[in-house]
Image (cartoon, helix red, strand yellow):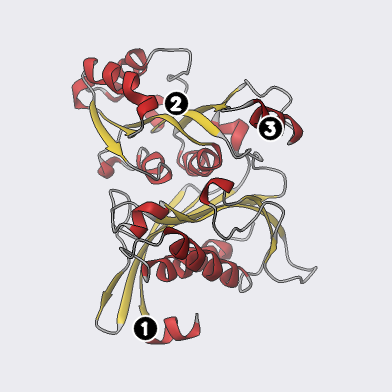
Amino acid sequence: MDRTLVLEYTRVTEAAAIAASTMIGRGDRNGADAAAVKAMRDAFERVAARGTIVIGEGERDEAPMLYIGEKVGPSDPTLPEVDIAVDPLEGTNLCANGLPGAITVLAVTDRGLLLNAPDCYMMKIACGPEGRGKISLSKSPRDNLYTLAAAKGRRPDELTVVVLDRPRHENLVTELREAGARIHLITDGDVAPVVATCIPKSGIDMVYGIGGAPEGVLGAAAIHCMGGEFVGKLVFRSDEERRRAIAMGHKDPDRVFGVDDLVRGDVIFVATGVTGGPLLKGVRRIGDRMHLQSLAIRSKTGTIRWVDTSVDATRFLSEH
């Protein structure tokens, strides 16, 4: 993939973030998602690549989708073909309720290098490069915490673990706390914390627990770019979900996935903040200008770019 695509796809997440920001705190999660989807779909048409959505919005959102198999971008046959994993608004509830941590996010690879994740749950553990090859779903949460602490040269009680605040995680939280971990409970949106495990200044050391499988692949794409660790296993709520996974090509639906099973090759990962959080600042309007912060990463070069953008608010919103 051409390196110029990094900036082009950053403009895509920026467009979605600005559109979503007009719905912050309005209590309308579907309206926020619809605004982000429309802006992202329109912005794809200005990118010099023919994209296929391989991971799109899940049925759980019950909102307008960038659906699996959708073609985005110009139809020019001379342009390169890419696969895209996307969440136009990761954390729709966070945006609708004016809470921290909502982002717009996508990952791009050459064709056939992203796992086509079914719309189900995934048990996942993510951490930074220190935990590479050391954490495992076969270990207890206590053992994984102790292993990562030793790898980082820190005590277990110095590590912060992000867990989705769900009843299913009650025992997990208890065990991690008894082992000494500092638990940061979040209501929604686990992609940003997964990415943050590879950013030392974020203060997040590990993400643990069950969340969305499509979001797991998005998080793993960033982990792949930064050399961190991610392990996951699909979790099915029904026989129908298991059958759907098998129909999508998952011959062994109970396998444990590592980073390289979820995403391979040259990867571009881009996220833009909508509401401020530990990873990115949110969209801010100051006078006639809107200020955004994005994170753009490319695995081929290992480059991590923090992109601060200021746009003319009146012109941008009138054009989009």
Name the image quarter holding the N terminus: bottom right
Image depth: mark 2 or mark 1 in front: 1
Residue 8, image x and y in percent? 54, 67
Q: Mark 2 or mark 3: which comes first in sequence?
A: 2
- Report helix, strand or loop for mark 2: loop
Q: How many marks?
A: 3
Alpha-carbon span between mark 2 and mark 1: 43 Å
As helix, strand or loop, the secondary structure at mark 1 comes to: strand
Q: Position of residue 3 (x, y in %)?
A: 57, 60
- Mark 1 lies on residue: 312
- Residue at image coords 52%, 66%: 12
Q: Quadrant of residue 313?
A: bottom left
Q: Which residue is mark 3?
A: 245
Q: Amino acid at mark 1?
A: Asp
Q: Say whether disc 2 or disc 1 marks the residue closer to the N-terminus.
A: 2
Looking at the image, residue 288 lies above or below residue 24: below
Query: Where is 44 relative to 209, above or below?
Result: below
